Structures are given as C-alpha cells and as structure tokens.
Image (tube, rainbow, N blue to C red):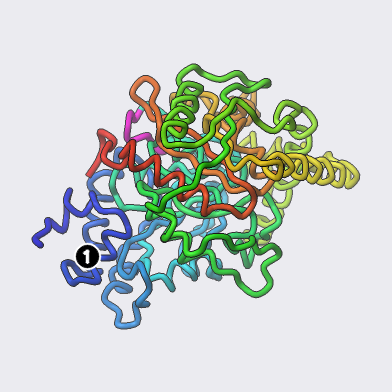
Amino acid sequence: MDFDHTTDDLAQFDAVGLAELIRQGDISPVEAVEATIGRIEALDGELNAVIHRQFETALAVATSPDLPDGPFRGVPMLIKDLWSEEAGQPHHCGVQALKDANLTSTIDSNLVRRYREAGFINVGRTNTPELGLVATTEPMAYGPSRNPWNTDYSTGGSSGGSAAAVAAGILPAANASDGGGSIRIPAAMCGLVGLKPSRGRISMGPVKEEWGVSVQHVVCHTMRDCAGILDATAIPFLGDGVVAPDHGRPYSDRVGENVDKLRIGLLAEHTMTGVHPDCADTARRTASLLEELGHDVVDAHPLALDQLEELSWAFNVNWGVGAVLSLEHLGGQLGRPVCEDDVESGTWLLAQMGDGHSATDYAKAQSLMATFRRNMAAWWEEGFDLLVTPTTAQPPPLLGDLTPTEDDPLRASKRSMPYAAFTSPFNTTGQPAISLPMGSSGGLPVGAQIVAAYGREDVLIAVGSQLEDEVRWSENRAPIHA
C-alpha cells in the first residue's frame, strides 16, 4: 500500500493498525516517528499538549537494531509528565520550581519499561496540571492545553495534554494516569476511550505504590488499542504491593466477542453536585443501547453512592496528605525544602490543609474508605455486572473556569468536584471503570462511564467493544486533526 507518511493517512490508524503496517514492512519505525514529529510541529502550537520533545532520541531508537520486537514495535508514544519517569528526560509534574531547575529523571518507571519492551518509542512528554491535582490542564508552569474540539475549552485533567494529542491525531494513544478521574475526565472531554484499570493492574513502581488511589494506562480511540496496550503493560514487577486478579486474559480476545446477557445498573443523578442534562442523557442513551443489545438494564445503583459525605471527607484527607508527600518528594528532587513560592497557591494551601490532619484523621480516613470499598463490592456480589453513569456531571468548562484566583486559591479544587463526582469513588474502591465517547454537549464531547467489579476489565472491554461497533466513535474526529 502507498501512504503519505507525514500527514493525514497514518493519523487514521490506531496503534494496533500502525504496528501491523510496520510488521508488514509498509512503513518503517523511522517513518512512523517522523510522521508523529511532523504532526506535533504542525498542531501543537495551537494545542500546547507536548511540553517536552525528545525527537532526536526517538529517531535514534527507531533506527536502532536493539528496538524490541514487541507487539507495538515502532509505534510512537507520549508519556504524561507526572510520575512516569524516564531516565535522562525532564520530569516536572507541572511544577515551576522543577522546570526552573531543569530537572531530569535518573530512573525508569516500571510502566515506561513495559512500554519499551512492547516496542513503543517515546517521542515526548505531555502537559499536566501541577501534581495532577485538578480536573483541568492549565498549569502556571507550562500554560493551558486546549481542546481540539474547541480551543476555548479545557481538555480536562490531569491527563489533558495526552488527551489533546490523541484527539488531534498526533498519535494513536498516549500514557495517562488517574487518581480521581484523570484518565476518564480528559477522555470524556476530548472524545476518547479512557480505561482506569483495577488497583494493582499496572505497576506504579519504583516511586509510587499500587495500594493508593492512582493507576495508569492510556487514552486512545479504539477498544482494541485499550485492550492490546493493557495486555502489553499489565505485567507485575517483583515487589508490587497489589497485583489485581486476572480474568479473561488476553484482553485483546475480548474485543468483538459475543457477550452473555449482563445485569446492568444505571445512575444518572448525583445527590451532591447535580448533573447537566446532556451528561445525564448520555448515560441514559448508553443504558438504552445496552438494553437494545440484549442486556438487562435497571435503574439501580449501590446505596453507598447516596451517602458520600463521609467518603468525601476521607478522600479529601487522603488527597491533602498526598499533596504533603508529593511536596516532600519534590523537595528531595530539588535538594531543599519546597517553599510557598515554588508551587501554585492552591497546591500550597492543599498541602497546608493536609499537614493539619492528625495521624488519627488519616487512619480514620483509610478506615472509612475501606468500609466504602466493601459496601460497594457487595452490590456487584449481589448479582450486578456493570454500573452506567455519566463520566462527568458537567460538560467541558471554558479555559480559566477551573483555575485558582488570588482571592480563592482552592477555586480549582472546588470547581473540579462536579468533574470527579462520578469518577473518584472508583479510585477509592479500586474498581476498573471506563469512559466511552457516547455523547456531546454544545459541540463538545461528553462521556458515559461504565464500572465493573474489581479485576473485571475483561467485561468492560467486551461491552465497550459492543458499543463501539454500534456507535463507531473513532470515525468522528475533532476539528483540529491531522
């Protein structure tokens, strides 16, 4: 086949398809990387998605005889600039002080090693809010990433740079992480597939731990990319604190398979934040389509989701203490204690609040989160297979709507709440949850979230594949697109 190696043709392929072209010899890894570089140079001035470019290194890897012969050999990848470290490359986490210090990492994160073993070639790092703490990607250190569907609007956060790059067709998939919705929220706002895997599915080492609320995977266009990349990276390392149980591996085999009738609950409202009609309607239409596909769908949900006041307190304690730990880690990288001028006002105040919690507060928060996890698991054990919700309670915000102000440093955190209202409970439970591009609001994408029992990514991938066959969302691309 003949391809234009530099512009639109290759941008239409997902990662699985691009890997197949390379295996067949239709294009080379160098040509794939050069095409991605060309799209970054053509599009990123408008998007501000890729904040660190490692083009020379990527081209060297692409020409090396040592390029691993994994399932994604020669396929370009972008790494979110938050905790996924690569030795010799910048690692700034959206923090001005680390940018000023021109910090580079000295280690490879375990997930970066898995990407390399799979044959991916990293071409750069993507924008993220400072420490990934809010639901929009507008760090003071690097400026806002812009939504390819309308550049006046947010990409979501904290994996907003990755989502913007994939939605614009710069590359098929990009690394993302999720501690309260940070894979699913940008996926919803940018019209992508965003799976948050189960706790312990992906190694978080050597810096982070698997028993926390954060996990990693990718944002992408297709279910087969979501599944295939998970197959390549969900391989534990010695010393991982949690290893999720295997069901239905390989995940790639779940794409396109026949699915037995499932019992599915629907929750389209939220007691604490309210829900925009377009977001609620997206969840309801998704539930209706699942019913048309032969599943048993009922208006039902875990009762624990109606009693979120204590969980909200516990999650905020955990989030604040996590901010304290993050600043201590950054201080170690800088070789001095972090001071107020080093970070944004909201980050500093959140860490100050976290520092004000006692050890007893933290222990109580962990206990409340454990109780919530067990109560939620009981609903699935009682016969339900999936829960459908909106991904976010509100459509994408305008840039600037979720940023802190001098008068209200916590404005970003407070205004992020409707965007994490449906996502963050499942960081607490550790369950897998996926956002699928099932709707729109004012010309901007909104997503439907589907949640499975712990360890059951296989069910999400199978059902997501059913919906993909019906909706064919990957054919609907953003206006700013290669």
Residue type at mark 1: give it.
Leu
Q: Is residue 143 magenta?
A: yes
Name the image quarter holding residue 14.
bottom left
- Residue extending furthest toward the bottom: 65
Horizontal side, residue 332 vs residue 277: left or right = right
- The range drawn in magenta is 142-151
Up the image or down, 439 lies above or below 238; here it is above
**As drawn, is 101 to the left or to the right of 304?**
left
Left or right: 409 with respect to 437? Answer: right
Q: Position of residue 286 (x, y in %)?
A: 45, 30
Rendered image quadrant of residue 451: top right
Per the image, the residue denoted by label 1 is 21
Name the secondary structure under disc 1.
helix
Q: Position of residue 178 (x, y in %)?
A: 57, 47
- Measuring from the top left, give residue 246's x and y in whole percent: 59, 63
Quadrant location of the C terminus in the rendered image: top left
Residue 134 or residue 213, whichever sits in front: 213
Is residue 318 visible to the viewer in this orientation of the structure?
Answer: yes
User: Which sits in the foreground, 30 or 27?
Assistant: 27
Quadrant showing the N terminus: bottom left
User: What is the chief secondary structure element of the magenta stretch?
Assistant: loop
Q: Residues within 10 Å of mark 1 (few under 14, many from 20)?
A: many
Q: Is residue 29 above or below residue 339?
A: below
Residue depicted at x 72% and y 26%: 306
What residue is at 34 percent from the left and 30 percent from the top? 151
**Measuring 45% from the left and 49% from the top, which residue is drawn there?**
462
Residue 157, how many percent across, how many down? 51, 39
Give yes or no for residue 400 being in the magenta stretch: no
Residue sitting nearer the eye, 407 or 260: 260
The residue positioned farthest toward the right in the image shown: 360
